[in-house]
């Protein structure tokens, strides 16, 4: 091979090397493997209401100032709750509380924080916590429970009712005072006397 041929081969080899380098440099890097996108499973609503009806008859409704509902489970966390429970005779009770939980499968409701219940029959109940067990239609109040109606005051660790507290079962350190007026302080009772007792009340 003459001198010109060698030079030509060298030039071609150099061009080939340059082409390889150019291809390597201009080939885009593989995109980094990103994190798996997880779509949100909940949404927050304001002043939303959950309603439970049977055959077009409303059993109860719950409205929350703020409600965080899960798409998958349909469960909900609630703040500043107002609920109504309706009786067959047309009477109803209203419940307010700071916080609440709604369980979609069972339709049970748990509320706590400054729980106040008022009835169209004139009763008022306060407690720290309350549960609505939908299957049995039972309301259960716990934590510093007190109920007043007319001239009666009842206190205990737990109060259960199936009819909006027209009748209720009082449990744990239960005591009842009758004959008081709204403006009167209830008499001091010996709590130990009523320790571990349960009293059904029909008022």
Image: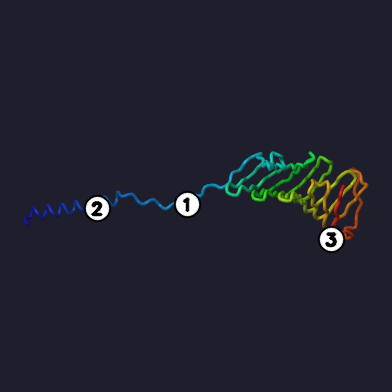
Q: Distance of mark 3 from mark 1, alpha carbons?
A: 56 Å
The residue that mark 1 highlights is: 36
Splitting the image into 4 quarters, where does residue 157 fall?
bottom right
Q: How many marks?
A: 3
80 sits left or right of 41 in the view = right
Read off the residue under disc 2: 20
Work out whether mark 3 precedes mark 2 in sequence or the reverse, and give the earlier one: 2
**Residue 132: horizontal and vertical position, in percent?**
73, 49
| Residues at marks 1 and 2, CA–CA distance in whole angstroms | 35 Å
Name the secondary structure under disc 2. Answer: helix
Circle 2 crowding by C-alpha within 10 Å: few under 14, some 14–19, many from 20 = few
- Whole-Å distance between the Cαs marked 3 and 2? 90 Å
Residue sitting farthest toward the front: 55
**Which part of the image, by quadrant, shows the N terminus?**
bottom left
How many other residues sit within 10 Å of disc 3, few (<14), some (14-19) or many (≥20)? few
Ranked by sequence position, the earlier of labels 1 and 2 is 2
The residue that mark 3 highlights is: 196
> What residue is shown at x 81% (from left), y 40% (from top)?
120
Residue under the image location 6 percent in, 55 percent down: 2
- Which is closer to the viewer, label 3 or label 1? 3
SS category of the residue bearing label 1: loop
Element type at marker 3? loop
């Amino acid at each position: 091979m003459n001198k010109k041929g060698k030079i030509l081969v060298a030039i071609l080899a150099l061009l080939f090397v340059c082409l390889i380098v150019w291809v390597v440099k201009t080939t885009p890097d593989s995109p980094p493997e990103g994190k798996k996108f997880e779509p949100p499973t909940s949404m927050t609503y304001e002043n939303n209401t959950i309603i439970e009806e049977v055959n077009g008859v409303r059993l109860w409704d719950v409205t929350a100032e703020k409600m965080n509902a899960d798409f998958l489970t349909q469960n909900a966390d609630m703040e500043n709750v107002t609920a109504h429970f309706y009786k067959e005779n047309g009477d109803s009770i209203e419940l307010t509380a700071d916080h609440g939980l709604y369980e979609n499968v069972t339709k049970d409701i748990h509320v706590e924080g400054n729980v106040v219940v008022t009835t169209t029959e004139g009763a008022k109940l306060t407690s720290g916590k309350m549960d609505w067990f939908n299957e049995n239609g039972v309301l259960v109040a716990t934590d510093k429970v007190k109920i007043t109606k007319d001239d009666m005051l009842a206190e205990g660790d737990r109060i259960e009712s199936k009819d909006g507290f027209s009748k209720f079962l009082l449990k744990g350190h239960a005591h009842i005072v009758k004959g008081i007026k709204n403006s009167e302080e209830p008499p001091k009772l010996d709590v130990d006397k009523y320790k571990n007792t349960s009293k059904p009340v029909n008022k």
